Image (tube, coloured by chain):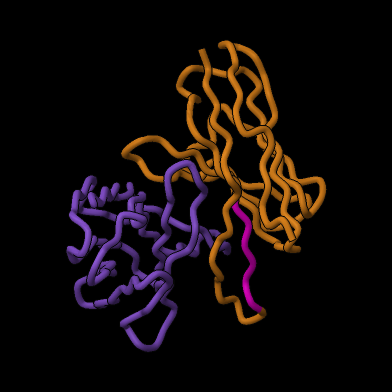
Amino acid sequence: AQSVSQHNHHVILSEAASLELGCNYSYGGTVNLFWYVQYPGQHLQLLLKYFSGDPLVKGIKGFEAEFIKSKFSFNLRKPSVQWSDTAEYFCAVNSFSGGYNKLIFGAGTRLAVHP
Amino acid sequence: NAGVTQTPKFRVLKTGQSMTLLCAQDMNHEYMYWYRQDPGMGLRLIHYSVGEGTTAKGEVPDGYNVSRLKKQNFLLGLESAAPSQTSVYFCASSYSTSSGRFIEQFFGPGTRLTVL
């Protein structure tokens, strides 16, 4: 069965620190990978996505993620976090089963950035 | 263009009561989804629909029913609410390209449901 594992459930950083959030997936087919962000009290928004091509994907707000096929990983990075990055981050993989597309989400990583 | 909207935003039910959550999208998307979000468990798919008049079970369908009578609306029903259904419910919609490529899902603002 397809699954997504996010290693860190809670991360606390100071402003300007670098961020890396881990994401590993289990899926045998062609993968489409996503990172979504949920700011406090808000709905999920897409940060970035990988379909094919360059494995280093750049998203909004200075985030990037690297797809490493051999490691089944799609880690999220940001060189210097800001207080406004405080949010919950979800990794997701597209699952194609029963003839239809669905997203499988990880459990999420809650990031707190202190000024 | 409102995107994906959900009503109500908050609701408190007593055990055994019923209610319907409404999701509407104005992007002409074929696919619609209902998720529940619980702490430490991410989002889990309850039911989904691949087009008007169609519905299918997701990962955690028990205790819920859905209907997609119109392409723009996707209703989630709880016939007899239980405390275990206390959660935040998110609706989403998406589409695939003509070549079958899956595009991102667009999410609504959520409904916070408490069952006492």
- For residue B84, which quarter of the picture? top left
- Asked if the stretch drawn in magenta spans residue B94, the answer is yes
- For residue A83, which quarter of the picture? bottom left
The chain coloured purple is A
- Apparent colour of chain B: orange
On the question of residue B73 being in view, the answer is: yes
The residue lying at 61 percent from left, 24 percent from top is B11
The residue lying at 49 percent from left, 58 percent from top is A45
Q: Is residue A63 left or right of residue B89?
A: left
Which of the two residues, B85 or A70, is positioned nearer the viewer here?
B85
On the question of residue A3 being in view, the answer is: no
Q: Is residue A41 left or right of residue B7?
A: left
Which of the two residues, A41 or B12, is positioned nearer the viewer here?
A41
Tell me where residue B60 appears, x and y as whole percent.
48, 37
Tell me where residue B79 appears, x and y as whole percent.
66, 22
Q: Is residue B93 left or right of residue A14?
A: right
Q: Is residue A41 above or below residue B26?
A: above
Tell me where residue A78 appears, x and y as whole percent.
27, 69
The residue lying at 56 percent from left, 61 percent from top is B105
The residue lying at 62 percent from left, 47 percent from top is B56
Tell me where residue A13 appears, x and y as whole percent.
18, 54
Magenta segment: B92-97
- For residue B66, which quarter of the picture? top right
